[in-house]
């Protein structure tokens, strides 16, 4: 319990001390393309290019990140609400080794795509500087929202942005 609290505090400090303006991938820019293996060895790799034409919510997470462990089940609920409208969720695990992410997923099954980026190459491509960091990508590949951290009330902000993109606004 104390370890979990300490991880939550450290994650919050990291997120709050880093400015979102330091991100190289910003709202209004095109999302960089990537191709990553699934965290599940028996599933195919996942490419952002293959999801062109869909609204994509990309979340970078790790099993050691307390806010990530809270947000992922909520993203699963959001995915189920909007998948029929064209929403895809990619939760990119940066756990190294990847087995640490798989251990979390054993207890918290998620229904969306989960690529694995253990070397952090895609996280580096997006210039992720805190966990979790998420990107809402429109069907034409434009970054519509960059969201760092996860706190109470964030799902309202995220879901409103998702609905707006899905409605074509």
Image: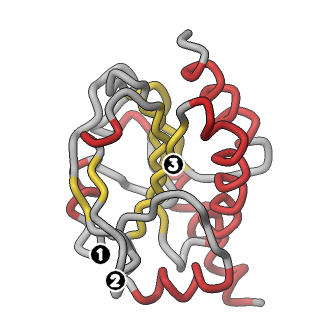
Q: Is residue 65 left or right of residue 133?
A: right
Residue 107 disc label: none
Indicate the position of residue 4 as horizontal and vertical percent values: 69, 83
The residue to which callout 2 is attached is 96
C-alpha separation, residue under disc 1 versus residue under disc 3: 19 Å
Crowd around label 2: few <14 · some 14–19 · many ≥20 (10 Å): some
Q: Which of the pair 48/31 is nearer the observer?
A: 48
For the residues marked 1 and 2, what is the alpha-carbon distance in whole angstroms?
5 Å
Q: Please give the residue where the numbered disc 3 appears in the rendered image.
A: 89
- On-image quarter of the N terminus: bottom right
Give the side of residue 105 with respect to residue 99, left or right.
right
Q: Tell me which residue sits at (71%, 42%) in the image.
A: 154
Can you give x and y, in whole percent of width and height, for residue 152 in the image? 79, 49
Q: In the rendered view, does 120 fall on the left or right side of 155?
A: left
User: In the picture shown, does residue 99 fall above or below 167?
Assistant: below
> Which residue is labeled 1 in the image?
118
- Establish if 48 lies above or below 64: above
């Amino acid at each position: 319990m104390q370890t979990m609290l300490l991880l939550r505090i450290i994650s919050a400090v990291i997120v709050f001390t880093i400015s979102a303006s330091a991100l190289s991938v910003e709202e209004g820019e095109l999302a960089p393309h990537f191709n990553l293996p699934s965290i599940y060895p028996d599933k195919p790799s996942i490419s952002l290019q293959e999801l062109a034409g869909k609204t994509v919510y990309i979340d970078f997470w790790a099993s050691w990140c307390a806010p990530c462990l809270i947000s992922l089940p909520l993203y699963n609920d959001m995915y189920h609400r909007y998948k029929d409208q064209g929403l895809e969720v990619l939760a990119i695990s940066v756990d190294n080794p990847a087995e640490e992410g798989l251990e979390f997923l054993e207890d918290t099954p998620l229904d969306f795509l989960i690529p694995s980026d253990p070397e952090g190459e895609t996280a580096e491509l997006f210039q992720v500087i805190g966990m979790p960091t998420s990107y809402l990508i429109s069907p034409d590949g434009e970054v519509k929202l960059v969201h760092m951290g996860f706190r109470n009330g964030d799902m309202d902000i995220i879901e409103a942005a998702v609905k707006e993109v899905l409605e074509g606004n």
